[in-house]
Amino acid sequence: MVLSNTLFDIFSCLAAILYLGSAGLVASNILYKKAFENLRSFVLISASASIIVHALLILHGYSLGNMLAHDFFNMLSLVFFVISVFFLISTLNKPVEVLAVIVFPFSAIAVLLNIGNAFPAEPSTVLSSALQVHIILSVLSYSLLTIAAFQAIILSIQEKQLHDRQPGHFINALPPLQLMENLLFQTITVGVFLLTFALGSGFIFLDDIFAQHLVHKTVLSILAWLVFSTLLWGRFYIGWRGQTAIKWTYGGYLALMLAYFGSKFVLQLVLGLN
């Protein structure tokens, strides 16, 4: 399904409005306390609508060359599409819809940044099916570990305000601290599992994973894997939690963010390479 430039931009704006609408509903409920009846249903409906529209944009990018559009802004949009899908699935069995106020504004920004990019420059190389599998695994792992980074930020704020005994409206609306911490480690566990397969597929499918244009991404991805794996080991064998877990999550995500988007930003937007 290929969209015209105009339709692509209209759908991008519509997806952003729906994302922000979901976040706005949650924010209003936090600020005014029960301002909306059936908040959960409204958020789920609005979130589902925004994800459907966002999916049309992703399908458009794929339809251009029967492969994933992997320029900087399309990949950013894809990552936050996956994050939004993961978030929506999580809300089906856990009371975490309040986190929409954090997740969905970023999804809206990612969609808006892609406006005017309906037909990006053709990549210099055609991706094989195996390499597309590698990219999909990478996107899935990066998306989950991005969610973990969001959770770590919220957990840090939650801990600080509870220790200060001055919880605000947002903190009072969150699930209990222990549930938030358990969710953090569940997310990291699945994210590391997928990152392991992403790295493994890279070693198998790429001709030279340490080639000049890939070496920084490879080294930083391996570093992120080591940091997150150490965190999980510390959690299950030493009992790491709280600020220790939060700091390790920040460290692992920083390495991963530089690997996935730092290198792509420099190569595409600074050096002008596709």
Image (cartoon, rainbow, N blue to C red):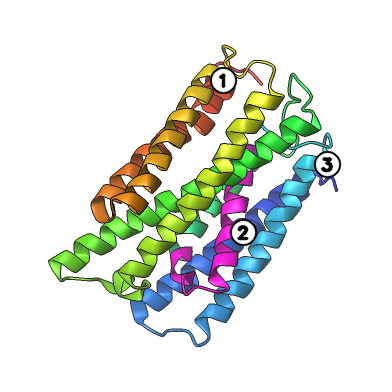
Whole-angstrom CA distance, mark 2 to mark 1, is 28 Å
Of the numbered discs 2 and 3, the one sitting upstream in the chain is 3
**What type is the residue that disc 2 sits on?**
Val
Of the numbered discs 2 and 1, the one sitting upstream in the chain is 2
- Front residue of 126/93: it is 93
**What type is the residue that disc 3 sits on?**
Ser
- Front residue of 177/22: it is 177
Residue for badge 3: 63
Q: Nearer the viewer, mark 2 or mark 1?
A: 2
In the image: residue 45, left or right of residue 28: right
Residue for badge 1: 267
Residue for badge 2: 85
Q: Residue at x 57, y 78 (%)?
A: 42
| Percent coordinates x, y for residue 30 in the rendering | 37, 75
Majority secondary structure in the magenta region = helix
Of the numbered discs 1 and 3, the one sitting upstream in the chain is 3
| Percent coordinates x, y for residue 65 in the rendering | 83, 34
Tell me the crowding category of disc 2: few under 14, some 14 to 19, or many 20 or more residues within 10 angstroms, Cα based. Answer: some
Q: Residue at x 76, y 41 (%)?
A: 61
| Percent coordinates x, y for residue 163 in the rendering | 16, 65
Can residue 38 be spotted in the picture?
Answer: yes
Residue range corresponding to the magenta coloring: 75-100
**What type is the residue that disc 1 sits on?**
Leu
